[in-house]
Image (spheres, grey):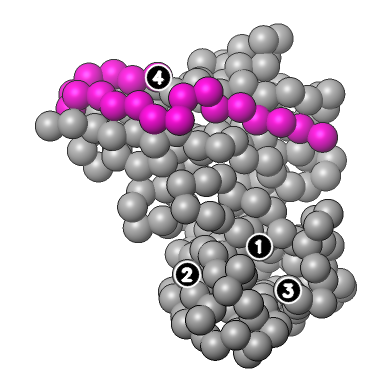
């Protein structure tokens, strides 16, 4: 199956700093990637759709200026959490669709962010 | 907007037994796909099985099969010959073809007991 690599797996940062999470499709090109947030024992909440070559599409209630998304190439999307606060601590997961039609989602390993 | 409901927060099954996880959804869309994903303790999401809404035949993948009832908007997952490695959280997901994105259920935590 297709491989999506997410880095880092975990990160601890201080309040007020920014942290960048990378999501790479290793063996296929992805014009679209998705960023999710997941709280413990809960479902995946879609934050935004990352689009290669254009602006990301954010879900209602997600702060665009806090969660900056850049889809720099057909294999890389990044999520930057700016001015992080403890309430931003969570598990962040990216996914990229592939297949015919372009529906099957392959997920990164996830990033556990802890803001102290 | 679509909603996906998994009514069983937790389930358990004995090793080698069969278990069925339920999922219902609500949509006005006619073109969509349904998925079951598995999230083991490592938290890596893994695709288990996929069903195209336009196909009447239920999808199967080895020990995993679905019961897709389109009129009832039901999409249950049957796991046969349960193995310890099946212990995970299972998510049902609805993919909206028009919107190009998925909606996930709240998940069912399955524990396979030896």
Give the total number of marks visible in the rendering: 4
What whole-number distance in Å separates the C-alpha atoms at marks 2 and 4? Answer: 31 Å
Do circles 3 and 1 both sit on a common chain?
A: yes
Residue under pointer 4: B20
Chain to which mark 4 belongs:
B
Helix, strand or loop under label 3? strand
Q: Is residue B75 visible?
A: yes
Say which quarter of the image contains residue A92.
bottom right
Question: In the displayed structure, would residue A75 be above or below residue B90?
Answer: below
Residue under pointer 1: A35
Residue under pointer 3: A67
Residue at the spot x=60%, y=85% of the render?
A15
What whole-number distance in Å separates the C-alpha atoms at marks 3 and 1? Answer: 10 Å
Q: Are marks 2 and 4 in contact (CB under 8 Å)?
A: no
Q: Are marks 4 and 3 in contact (CB under 8 Å)?
A: no
Query: Of label 3 and label 1, which has the lower sequence position?
Result: 1
x%, y% of residue A70? Answer: 75, 78
x%, y% of residue B28? Answer: 84, 23
């Amino acid at each position: 199956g297709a491989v999506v690599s997410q880095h880092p797996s975990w990160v601890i940062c201080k309040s007020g700093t920014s942290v960048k999470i990378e999501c790479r499709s290793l063996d296929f090109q992805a014009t679209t990637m998705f960023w999710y947030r997941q709280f413990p024992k809960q479902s995946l909440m879609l934050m935004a759709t990352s689009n290669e070559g254009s602006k990301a599409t954010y879900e209602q209630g997600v702060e665009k200026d806090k969660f900056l998304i850049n889809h720099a190439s057909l294999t890389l999307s990044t999520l930057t959490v700016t001015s992080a606060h403890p309430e931003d601590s969570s598990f962040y997961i990216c996914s990229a669709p592939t297949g015919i039609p372009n529906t099957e989602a392959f997920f990164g390993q996830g990033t556990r962010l802890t803001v102290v | 907007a679509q909603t996906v409901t998994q009514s069983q927060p937790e389930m358990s099954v004995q090793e080698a037994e069969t278990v069925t996880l339920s999922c219902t959804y609500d949509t006005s869309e006619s073109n969509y796909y349904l998925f079951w994903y598995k999230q083991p303790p490592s938290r890596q999401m893994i695709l288990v099985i996929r069903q195209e809404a336009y196909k009447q035949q239920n999808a199967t993948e080895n020990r995993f099969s679905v019961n897709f009832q389109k009129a009832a908007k039901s999409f249950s997952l049957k796991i046969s010959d349960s193995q310890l490695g099946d212990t995970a959280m299972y998510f049902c997901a609805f993919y909206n073809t028009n919107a190009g994105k998925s909606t996930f259920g709240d998940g069912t935590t399955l524990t396979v007991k030896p």
